[in-house]
Image (tube, grey):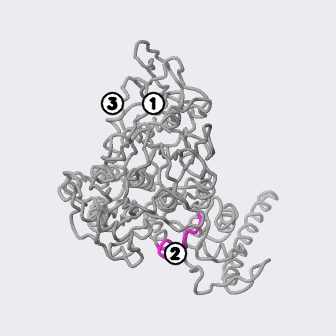
Amino acid sequence: MSVTARRDCLAERLVMLQSAILFVVLFFSLPLYLSSPAMAGGPVSLAPQDVEEKSSPFDGLRWSEDQPEVQVDETWYEPVTIDGIDVKEILAFADQWPPGREKRFAEDLAPILMALKWKGDRMVDLDLQSLEDGSAVRIEGVEMTLAKRQALLLSRRSASRISAESTHISVEDAHRDVEAFGAGLKDQFAYLGLGEVDLDRELAQIREGLTGEQVDILELRLALHRLLMRFGDGHAQVRSNLPLGQAGDKYLPFLLVESSAGVVAVLPDRSALVEPVAPVVRAIDGKAMDEWIELARPDIANGSPQLVRRRALGDMREIDEVRRALGEATGEPLMVTFSTADGSETIDRELELSSRRPTYGSWPRSQSAILEGDIGYLRIVQMNDEVDALHEAMEEFVDTKGLIVDVRGNGGGTRELLLALGGYLIDPKEPAVVGNIAQYRQSPRFDEDHLEARYMHRADWEGWNDRQREAIRVAAAAFKPEWQPKGEFSAWHYLVLDRTGHSAEYFYDLPVVVLSDSGCFSATDIFLGALELLPQVTLLGTASSGGSARSQSFGLPKTGMEVRCASMASFRPDGRLYDGRGIEVDIEVLPAPEDFLSAGGDAQLKAALERL
């Protein structure tokens, strides 16, 4: 053996020895962090009221290459910090504990955090980055639970049954997943029976189509997803760990948005329209925009027209993935037909695809302020629990001559801001207001307080005061749901807007205009649906997308696919469903094409100011 070969062999042995020593050190030292002082700072203990050793704050976990993406409630993010501890530091620690980051981040997060001098509270604050637009998001008070950790563990074990190279399963296993899909919906899905879908018949047809020895997992996912979309649940989806696209896929080089002129193309940095003189996109690759939307419809929930159009236009960003599904060549330049608003002039352009997926981001990018004319402007980008900021803004607006509340593009979240703002807009001399009536499907998985996170309770809840009970009595007597949920459901639950008793609260009795668009969804639909009932409130802009679900998820045992569906049938007090409709506006104003540019105008805000 040569000197070089001996040297290389010795180096390999040293690396193996170092790895073995590191494993032994970690194996025996990590548990000590749980019972003795951490390396450089203070004791770490697990008091009964504190976090479980086997727990997690995440509802879902998936990996993009070697980086985690986490789900909190119904939204996916890239995690940045957990209670101030950098996720990069967490992953670096996990990498040293065999078999590495994917298993340890999912199953041993709490011990790793404690080893990194974490305080060990059951509630943690999460700093996250939106996967949609890259914006920073902070969610406080997220509970670390054993149930979440177990769900991640089961999901990981299911996914591990399919190797990274395998995209197929046996027909027998596919049949088991179809059976589990149907059983899960019958157990949890609130909108089972909504529409003309015969679940058993549709599942039988899917099973009949499973032929041969192997079944393509993504084709099975597509069949199940499209079936679920037909019920109209805007939150629903069937998701696989396998990527839908392929390496090297390219994207649209612009964003598609709806304007008063029609669908227009905007550069991703919002600096300009792609074709300023003729901004309207008439066709892409020879297909008219309405044709593209119809092609996308089976993959989108059978909801309101505005929901379908917005999601279809957004999904077109993955143009190579769309082309592949249509059997067309990928990677080729786009042929785009632009026109003037009146269609009198058209321009055909060939555009190269982008290697980066364009992101919409929150829009408009404005902040709360007092506008000219002494009008208060309250911008709410996300429905979160930052009620202190709302109270501070309302304190500034106490002497204004009118109020504009802008929730355009707000995809939802929680209901705290609705309740807090409602406290200012409810006349103390008038009755409280019921803004949402719902019931959830009975399932062994759901506790009696299943809707408590939505601030909804039964009529006999002890927490109501007399004023609120009277509002519920009146609302319940008049309530006639347009659709009666099928199966075993809970009693009706109610969301009530009333004075909150906050020390800063006062009655804002001047006109209020709320700005809405099709980007408003989920908790923002409830926000709009409740506030529209108040006499001083006018909704202006365009209708929201429509959705209210209390989504739950379950996994399929053989593929590890995640099925998400509504557990709550949710209604407006007049009996109309939130899902599938959206909240109509009192005054419809569409944005001009230039309104989507950083240096553009804002026709809807201008109309709101004129209204006030």
Q: Position of residue 194 (x, y in %)?
A: 23, 55
Disc 1 vs disc 3: which is toward the camera?
1
- Mark 3, residue position: 291
Question: Badge 1: how crowded within 10 Å, few (<14), some, or many (20+)?
Answer: some
- 84 left or right of 366 in image: right
The residue lying toward the viewer, choosing from 386 and 300, is 386
Q: With respect to residue 248, does 189 lie above or below?
A: below
Q: Position of residue 106 (x, y in %)?
A: 55, 68
Residue 464: quadrant of the picture: bottom left
Residue 67 seen in the figure: no
Mark 3 residue element: helix
- Residue 149 within the magenta-colored segment of the rendering: yes
> Which numbered circle lies on residue 145?
2
Q: Position of residue 121 (x, y in %)?
A: 62, 77
- 444 left or right of 330 in image: left
- Mark 1, residue position: 259
The residue lying toward the viewer, choosing from 589 and 68, is 589
The first of marks 1 and 3 along the sequence is 1
Amino acid type, mark 2: Thr
Amino acid type, mark 1: Ser
Mark 2 residue element: loop
- Which residue is pictured at 40% across the width and 45% down the height? 544
> What distance separates the C-alpha of mark 1 from that of mark 3?
18 Å
Residue 82: quadrant of the picture: bottom right
Region rendered in magenta: 140-150
